Image (tube, grey):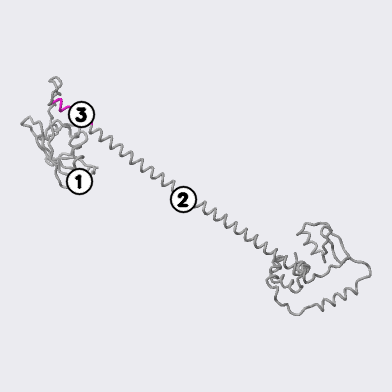
Amino acid sequence: MTSQETVQILIDMGFQKEKAEKSVSMTGNQGVEPAMEWLLAHNDEEMGPSTSQEGSTSNTKSETNTSSATVAKSYKCEDCNKLFADTTALEYHAMKSGHSNFAESTEEKKPLTEDEKKEQMKKLEERLKEKRKEREAKEKGEELEREKIRIRSGKEMAAAKKKLEDENIKKIMDERKREKQEEKVARDRVKAQIEADKLARKKLYGQAPVEEQPKPVLPVAVSPQKQTKDYTETKLQIRLTNGQTIVQTFNVKEMMAAVRVYIELNRSDGDAPFCLMTSFPRKVFTNEDYEKPLDQLGLVPSAVLILTKPQQ
């Protein structure tokens, strides 16, 4: 729409020509609505000398040149009976109202009275307020939707993080449970071995009949100490990693594993893994040695055992 068409629409609405032209110029010819907003904001400003005299002279010349023949002075909307001064105002009305039945009219469009102008201004103000409300409501809705998206994204990230943490915690708990189960199985195995050793000792030194006596143990080919007496017990001094010593008497037929279990139940230096060894002659006992009786390991009638860290 050209600037002249916009000015004409504003004039038909009841605005002064000078103000209409200035509003279009000040808004950069962006349309009727921006121009109306500018007019409402600057309605009380003075526009300078009026050009009504020039307009009157122009109208006089126009009337002089007008032929006596009847010509159309306006356009009429057959749907609502409104009059329009030119086709520009007519097109604007058709676009806004959707009416399509128009005809030329010899009736001259009368200028708006002061009351009509006030009423027109009131309608324009209400229309602008409605548009502002619609725009504010739209912006508020868009802002609310963005906030919902932000909150939803934050919740999804928090849920994903918590899920990952829960999975890591579950893995750690399962690993600890498995380690405890393995430790329990190992302890139960050692305890079962001790009970079996006790039962064997009862049969050996208790009421067991002669035919149930265990077979004599074959002598070890290489023994650190030569036994000159048939000992039934041995006294062991056990040096812990914190420097303390515990002393305990064991039957010579007890397995080395029984000594290890006794140490685990009575030690005062923590529960770190350990190995057993003798200082002289130096010997580090292996897993196979724990299944052998003390007399076969040369720990009779007494010996000193030292706790050391496991070898890598």
Residue at 6% in and 31% down: 229
Residue at 82% in and 62% down: 82
- Viewed as shown, does residue 36 lie left or right of 268? right
**Where residue 10 sits in the image (x, y, percent)?**
76, 68
Q: Which mark is residue 158?
A: 2
What kind of residue is marked 2?
Answer: Ala
What kind of residue is marked 1?
Answer: Asp
Of pointers 2 and 1, the one earlier in the residue sequence: 2
SS for dot 3? helix
Residue at 59% in and 57% down: 142
Q: Image quarter for residue 275?
A: top left
> Which is nearer the eye, 160 or 47?
47
Dot 3 corresponds to which residue? 196
Dot 1 corresponds to which residue? 269
Residue 277 in the image: above or below residue 129 = above
Residue numbers of the magenta segment: 192-204
**Where residue 305 sits in the image (x, y, percent)?**
14, 40
